[in-house]
C-alpha cells in the first residue's frame, strides 16, 4: 500500500506520482508524452541528453505547465538520465518512467497503481507493450500469461516504480549507457526479494524502431536494424547480465542466450554491412565475458 505520509494525491485520486521522461534529440512526440503524463501525474520531469548546441527538449516543450526540464548539454546515457530524474522527483510515492516517444494512454497510472497496491512487495507494475499496427503484443508470450503476471524483467517505458523500492535498490547502472539498463534494474529488484508484475490488460503502444520482418508466412525472422555501434552494447551488456544472473535466474539466463543467438543470426542474415555489424557483436561478447570496454564504441566516440 502507498505510505500514509503521502505528500498529496492527483486529482484522479491516485497517490502522488511523478513522471520521468528521458529525451535525446526529441521530436514533437515528446510534447505529446509530457502533456499526457501531466494529466495523470503531479509532476513531469524531462531529462534531456541532447548535446549542447543542438535543438533539444526546450524547443519542443516551451513553457509547458507542470513540466520541469533538466538539461546540461551532454549525453550521459539513459541510466544517468533516469538517475537524475528520480533524484529530482523526491516526495513522490511512485515514478512513472517513460521514453520521449511513449504513448501514454488515459488511466495508465491509476490502473498500474491498482496492481502496485495488491502487495507492498511489488516494486514495479508495468503495462504490456503493444504493436498498434499489427494489433498484437510485442512479446508473443504475453497472451499465454495470467492477466497480472509476475515477471523477471519488464521494459523501462511505462513502468510504475514504487519510491521505497527505488530508494532501496539505488541507482540505475550507468556503465551500461543504454541497452540492458531496465533488465539489470529488474533483476536486482528480484534478487532483493521484490516482485515485478505486468498487467496485460493495460496496453502500452510501443515502437521497436526500424524493425523489419523477413521471410514468408511462419518462416519469418524479425531484424532490429539498430545502428552498428548499439550492437556492441546490446551484446556486451547482454552477456554481462547472463554471467551475473545465471545462478540466480537460470531460466531467464537461458532464455536470454537463445534470444541473443536469434538476434545475432538475424543480423548475419539480413543486416548489411554484415562484416562490420558482426564484428561489433563479437567485440561486445568478448568484453561482456571479460568485463572490458572497447573504446571504439564508447559513448563519446559514437554520439
Image (cartoon, grey):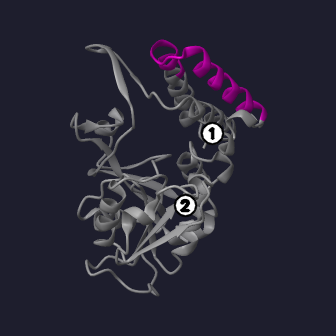
Q: Is residue 165 left or right of residue 150?
A: right
Question: Does 265 appear in magenta?
Answer: yes
- Does residue 41 appear anywhere in the picture? yes
Check disc 1: other Cα within 10 Å, few if <14, some if 14-19, many if 20+. few
In the rendered view, tell whether residue 180 sits above or below residue 123: above
Q: Is residue 96 visible?
A: no
Residue placed at 65% from the left, 44% from the top? 299
The one nearer the camera, 2 or 182, is 182
Task: Find disc 2 in the rendering and name its residue.
Answer: 82
Q: Quadrant of residue 158?
A: bottom left
56 sits to left or right of 63: right
- The quadrant where residue 141 appears: top left
- In this rendering, the label closer to the viewer, 2 or 1: 1
Is 76 positioned to the left or the right of 142 in the image? right
User: Mark 1 highlights which residue?
Assistant: 302
Quadrant in which the N terminus is drawn: bottom left
Rendering coords of residue 232 (x, y %): 63, 31
Name the foreground residue: 60 vs 124: 60
Q: Earlier in the sequence, mark 2 or mark 1?
A: 2
Residue at x-position 59% and y-position 63%: 83
Q: Residue at x 51, y 71 (%)?
A: 163
Amino acid at each position: 500500500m502507498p505510505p500514509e505520509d503521502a505528500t498529496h494525491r492527483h486529482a484522479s485520486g491516485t497517490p502522488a506520482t511523478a513522471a520521468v521522461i528521458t529525451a535525446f534529440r526529441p521530436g514533437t512526440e515528446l510534447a505529446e508524452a509530457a502533456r499526457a503524463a501531466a494529466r495523470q501525474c503531479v509532476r513531469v520531469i524531462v531529462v534531456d541528453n541532447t548535446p549542447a548546441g543542438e535543438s533539444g527538449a526546450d524547443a519542443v516543450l516551451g513553457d509547458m505547465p507542470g513540466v520541469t526540464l533538466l538539461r546540461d548539454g551532454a549525453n550521459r546515457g539513459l541510466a544517468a538520465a533516469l538517475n537524475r530524474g528520480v533524484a529530482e522527483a523526491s516526495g513522490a510515492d511512485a515514478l512513472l518512467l517513460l521514453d520521449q516517444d511513449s504513448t501514454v494512454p488515459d488511466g495508465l497510472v491509476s490502473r498500474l497503481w491498482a496492481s502496485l497496491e495488491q502487495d507492498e512487495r511489488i516494486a514495479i507494475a508495468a503495462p504490456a507493450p503493444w504493436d498498434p499496427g499489427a494489433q498484437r503484443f510485442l512479446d508473443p508470450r504475453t497472451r499465454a500469461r495470467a492477466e497480472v503476471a509476475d515477471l523477471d524483467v519488464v521494459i523501462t517505458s511505462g513502468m510504475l516504480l514504487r519510491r521505497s523500492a527505488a530508494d532501496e535498490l539505488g541507482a540505475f547502472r550507468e556503465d551500461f549507457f543504454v541497452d540492458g539498463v531496465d533488465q539489470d534494474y529488474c533483476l536486482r529488484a528480484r534478487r532483493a526479494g521484490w516482485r515485478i508484475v505486468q498487467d496485460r490488460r493495460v496496453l502500452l503502444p510501443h515502437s521497436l524502431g526500424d524493425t523489419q520482418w523477413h521471410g514468408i508466412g511462419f518462416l519469418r525472422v524479425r531484424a532490429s536494424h539498430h545502428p552498428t555501434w548499439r550492437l556492441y552494447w546490446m551484446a556486451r551488456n547482454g552477456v554481462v547480465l547472463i554471467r551475473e544472473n545465471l545462478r540466480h535466474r537460470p531460466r531467464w539466463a537461458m532464455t536470454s542466450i537463445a534470444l541473443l543467438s536469434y538476434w545475432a543470426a538475424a543480423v548475419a542474415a539480413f543486416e548489411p554491412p554484415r562484416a562490420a555489424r558482426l564484428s561489433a557483436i563479437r567485440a561486445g561478447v568478448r568484453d561482456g565475458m571479460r568485463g572490458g570496454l572497447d573504446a571504439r564504441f564508447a559513448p563519446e566516440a559514437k554520439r
